[in-house]
Every structure is written in C-alpha cells, then in structure tokens.
Image (spheres, rainbow, N blue to C red):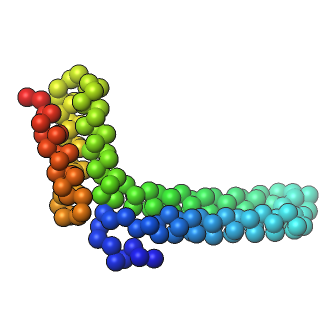
Amino acid sequence: MAEAKLKEGEFDEWLLGDMYDELKGHSFALEALAELITSASLEEFSEETSGKHKSANLRWGLSQIFGLYFERQQKTLESYLNKFNNLDLSLINRGKNLLELVSCGSYNNDERANEMLNEAIGYLDVVIGRESEYKDVAEGVKGECLGRLRA
C-alpha cells in the first residue's frame, strides 16, 4: 500500500483495491459462517432441546456475530469514504459545486449564499495550504468564490 508515502490529500490509486480486499475478506467470513450454519445441526437453538433460556441466548449470540461484521463493514466503508472526501480533488469539486449552486441562483438570500461561498473557500484553503499540485486550481476557484461574495 503506497498510502504512507503520499502527502495528505493526494490520490492513492491502490485505495479502491485496498477497500475491495478488506470488504471481500469480510464477505468470505460471512459466507463461511453461513455455510457452517447451513450444514450444522441447530438443535441447540431449539427451545424444545435446550430450553427457552439457552436457545434464546444462542440466537442472540448469533445475531451479535452478524451485527459485529456489519458494524465492521460500515466502519471500513466510512474510513475509506473519509479518505476520499479529504482528497484535494474532492475538496476542489465540493468548492466548485457550492460555487455553481450560488452562481445559478440556488440561494436568493445573500446571507445563505455567502455561507455557502465561505464553506467552499474553506475547502479550497485546505488544498492551498497543502501546497499540492492542485494549488493553482484551488486558488482560481477561490478567486471566483471571493468575486461572488455578496455585500
């Protein structure tokens, strides 16, 4: 994984592959568990065989296993999504999108339009502060935002 060598905000082309591999591993684990459940004798889960208390605990425990895997997958997805959202190009695109919304008149209220432009400027300032290869692009979009600020 080349991620450690990159400066903050740079794109790592391996990021998608890493995410896929991690989630695929979760899928294999769930698939294996499903196969075990399919081929196993589940008599212990029956109230008639084990009693109401034990069978209820076993069913609850099984639901916890699935819940933990789903929670883990959710955290994995959120982690990678945060990485993508923090990329220079993502920040620039968010800034451009907010500028476009203001430019096409989505915000008739000057105060709200200025809030959106200031939010865009905040995203662009992050990119500018990183001194990345996209600094000039971010500065250009920031200039457009500053030009659109309403008095």
| Residue occupying the point 88% across, 67% down | 39
Q: Position of residue 150 (x, y in %)?
A: 12, 29
Q: Position of residue 140 (x, y in %)?
A: 17, 47
Give the residue at the far left of this rendering: 151
Quadrant showing the N terminus:
bottom left
Near-viewer residue (32 or 12):
12
Q: Position of residue 93 (x, y in %)?
A: 32, 47
Near-viewer residue (43 or 142):
142
In the visual, does 11 lie left or right of 54? left
Q: Would you say residue 62 is visible in this rendering? A: yes
| Residue occupying the point 12% across, 36% down | 147
In the visual, does 56 lie left or right of 25? right
Q: What is the quadrant of residue 134 in the picture?
A: bottom left
Near-viewer residue (119 or 99):
99
**How many circles with numbers are drawn on the protein?**
0
Q: What is the quadrant of residue 82 in the picture?
A: bottom left
Near-viewer residue (65 or 54):
65
| Residue occupying the point 87% across, 58% down | 46
Q: Say if 83 sits above or below 91 in the image.
A: below
| Residue occupying the point 15% across, 33% down | 148
Q: Position of residue 11 (x, y in %)?
A: 37, 64
Quadrant showing the C terminus:
top left
Q: Would you say residue 61 is visible in this rendering? A: no
In the visual, does 99 lie left or right of 11? left
Q: Say if 138 sits above or below 15 in the image.
A: above
